Image (spheres, rainbow, N blue to C red):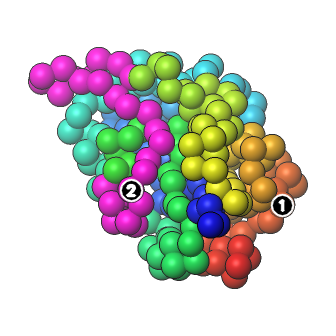
Amino acid sequence: MEFPKLICFDCDSTLSAIEGIDELARVRGPDIFAQVEAMTNDAMNGKLSVEAVFARRLEIIQPRLVDVAAIGQRYIETIEPTARATVAALQRQGWQVVIVSGGFRPAIRPLADLLGVARVEAVDLFFDEAGNYRGFDERFPTTRSGGKPEVVAALRRELQPARTVMVGDGVSDMEAKPMVDVFVGFGRYVERAKVKAGAHHFIRSLDALPALLA
């Protein structure tokens, strides 16, 4: 019996055009948005470690539950144009699709549901009864550098796939390269030189994947 094939997708700037953390910051005004966006870019380009910016960005933003719900809708509104068809095609080819993200599970869940992706490996946020921010799951691997390879390694141990692929735009995605058979860099929204140079393949539209992985 052949084990399932596993494909892990980043979410932000891959399945959707936005960076969720930046959109949460945008709600708080232009100054906070500019500050957070710069930190996000430095982390995605490998200039800062993920752990150097993760907690700090949330402390600055203080996101509310209602803001997270709004970002969930924004993910859907800015979905990569070929994502739904691509995920469906991959599933028909026998791929198990998992979203592996340094973003926030409650914001990503609506997009995952739209895509028909049951499993989301992302960071949980905590709120009080009034919907005010009360912290995040600091133990989750993607809150720090090297987190995505940890998640992918755990998925491989659990699922025992015959083949494993990671797709994403950032350096944090490329960190999973040693854990997968194929790392596909993605550049529709942001083309990162380090990712383009280090990827096994580099694409600008997700609908290139089914043929590439057939």
- In the rendered structure, the answer to whether residue 157 lies left or right of residue 184 reads left
The residue under label 1 is which amino acid type?
A: His
- In the picture of the structure, the residue carrying the numbered disc 1 is 200
Q: Are marks 2 and 1 in contact (CB under 8 Å)?
A: no
- In the picture of the structure, the residue carrying the numbered disc 2 is 118
| Residues shaded magenta | 110-136
Name the residue at 60% across, 71% down: 206
Check if residue 54 falls in the magenta segment: no
Q: Nearer the viewer, mark 2 or mark 1?
A: 2
The reply to whether residue 139 is in sight is yes
The residue under label 2 is which amino acid type?
A: Ala
Q: Nearer the viewer, residue 139 or 52?
A: 139
Residue 113: give x, y in percent of width and height: 33, 60
Q: Residues within 10 Å of mark 1 (few under 14, many from 20)?
A: few
- As drawn, 172 above or below 97: above
Residue 59: give x, y in percent of width and height: 41, 18
Residue 33: give x, y in percent of width and height: 45, 36
Q: Earlier in the sequence, mark 2 or mark 1?
A: 2
Indicate the quadrant containing the C terminus: top left, top right, bottom left or bottom right: bottom right
Name the residue at 71% across, 73% down: 213
Q: Nearer the viewer, residue 175 or 88?
A: 88
The numbered mark at residue 43 is: none
Q: Nearer the viewer, residue 11 or 164?
A: 164
Quarter of the figure with residue 27: top left
- As drawn, 31 above or below 214: above
Marks 2 and 1, how far apart at CA? 27 Å
Name the residue at 82% across, 48% down: 194
Indicate the quadrant containing the N terminus: top left, top right, bottom left or bottom right: bottom right
Q: Indicate the secondary structure of the residue bearing disc 1.
A: loop
Check if residue 134 falls in the magenta segment: yes
**Residue at the left extreme of this rendering:** 130
